[in-house]
Image (tube, grey):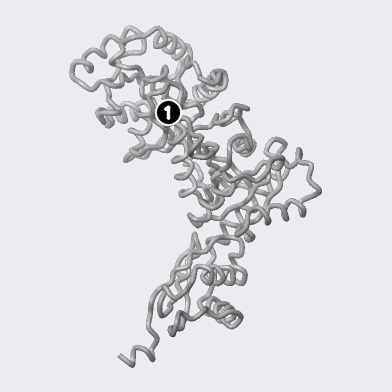
Amino acid sequence: MPLPTVVIVGRPNVGKSTLFNFLARRRIAIVEPTAGVTRDRISTVIEEEDLRFELVDTGGLGVVDSESLEDHIEAQIETALRSADLICFLVDARDGITPLDRRVANRLRRLLKPVVFCANKADTPRLAEAAVEFFELGLGEAMPVSAKGRKGRLELLQALSEHLGNIEGRDEPLEAVMRLAVVGKRNVGKSTLINTLAGEDRVIVSEVPGTTRDSVDVRFERAGQVFIAIDTAGLRKRARMKDAIERYSRVRTEAAIRRADVCLLLIDAAADISATDKKIARFVLGEKKPLVLGVNKWDLAKHAGTEAYEEYIAHHLSGFDFVPLAFMSAMTGEGVRGTIGLAEELYKQAGTRAPTAKVNQVLQDALRKRSPRSRGTALPKIYFASQVDVHPPTIVMFVNKPEFFSPDYIRYVENALRKSLPFAEVPLKLIMRERTSFFEQGKK
């Protein structure tokens, strides 16, 4: 059973996302002066002593969206309100009561759900005192807070706790076994896939490029286990970014990749591999994250077959030969189950430990096949190696001088280790550490 859910609502630009981040004590939702930045439901779990609940940020009620997504945003808010155990209604203490505040208050009264009423941006004693005027909205006295000024957090949590204490107890949600970041260019089907996994319209799907602006964590179940899929903003070249929102979205996507266990890079089967696709793939592997290349919209593609497309990928994505491909359709669901199963397999590989004896056996075989080139009169030497960590599999190689080994030879060693050890499809972290041999120590 889920945790109690607290949903933050209000008209645009009253500081809902700022309050969300303030309560969470970390920056999760994008905060921008532009109205309508938040479109999807953003959620996180708040834990404060004995208090534990799911907090949900929503778009602004009554927002006029620049790309005519009002109906989609409204549907997300309506879903959030239906699922809410407690509503945190936010108004702006500096603006006073507005007609849209009245409309929101009327709607909340009809819901017959408990409401904690907050007047945000009460940065001064005068503004805090003026919050009494909101009593007129018929939802009780508005609690003055300042999310940006970091005032009133404990008082608000106390008010939430008093209401949540009256909600029937629920079982703790199962811990997620894997976090899967779904990444890619704009309009490749990331949000469609997230909704397919969730079994509901959890995030907005639209033909409008750049609909998803923030990273959205969505829980889903598979074979009795819980996973988190992270929907991310579609990326494009930095030079084509229009505003700060796009730049924030890019930062959020990169952060989602870093905290993911596995990344699924969606590629449009009907389009050519682009420079952006390559850049995303390089970034994921640079962060040493397991990567699945999800060839989406395969049902619409007019290719000769999977083998021909694999050859096409190998030609246009050189250096990614160990990364597995999955052919799928997020719209129809075809191949989605197998794709998630493949991501699970990569997660297991990344968590595997190889015996030190096996690591050194593979290393010696690689050295016999190809020795490192000498640097002048100096000969590169490898003494032994050992795996020291997982996620990613991390192998330390003890050598005489790390600088003696060229990047090309290090890649050769990585590939040799990967092919022969039980993590053939995930990136390795190879650390070259200087260490003199026993005989060289004796000469000193």
Numbered label tally: 1
Residue sitting at the far right: 304
Judge from the rendering whether residue 429 lies leftward or rightward of residue 440; answer left or right. right
| Front position in the image: 441 or 160 | 441
Residue sitting at the far front: 376
Q: Position of residue 41 (x, y in %)?
A: 49, 29
Q: Quadrant of residue 138?
A: top left
On the question of residue 168 being in view, the answer is: no
Mark 1 Cα shell of 10 Å, populated few (<14), some (14-19), many (≥20)? many
Judge from the rendering whether residue 265 lies leftward or rightward of residue 12; answer left or right. right
Q: Quadrant of residue 208?
A: top right
Query: Residue at (34%, 9%) from the top-left corner?
Result: 97
| Front position in the image: 14 or 311 | 311
Check disc 1 and report the residue beneath it.
Answer: 6
Judge from the rendering whether residue 6 lies leftward or rightward of residue 220; answer left or right. left
Amino acid type of the residue that numbered disc 1 sits on in the rendered structure: Val
On the question of residue 33 being in view, the answer is: yes
Which quadrant, please, contains the C terminus? bottom left
Q: Position of residue 27 (x, y in %)?
A: 37, 37
Helix, strand or loop under label 1:
strand
Query: Residue at (42%, 74%) from the top-left corner?
Result: 402
Q: Position of residue 158 (x, y in %)?
A: 30, 29
Q: Position of residue 210 (x, y in %)?
A: 55, 31
In the displayed structure, would residue 222 be above or below residue 442? above
Residue sitting at the far left: 125
In the displayed structure, would residue 135 be above or below residue 154? above
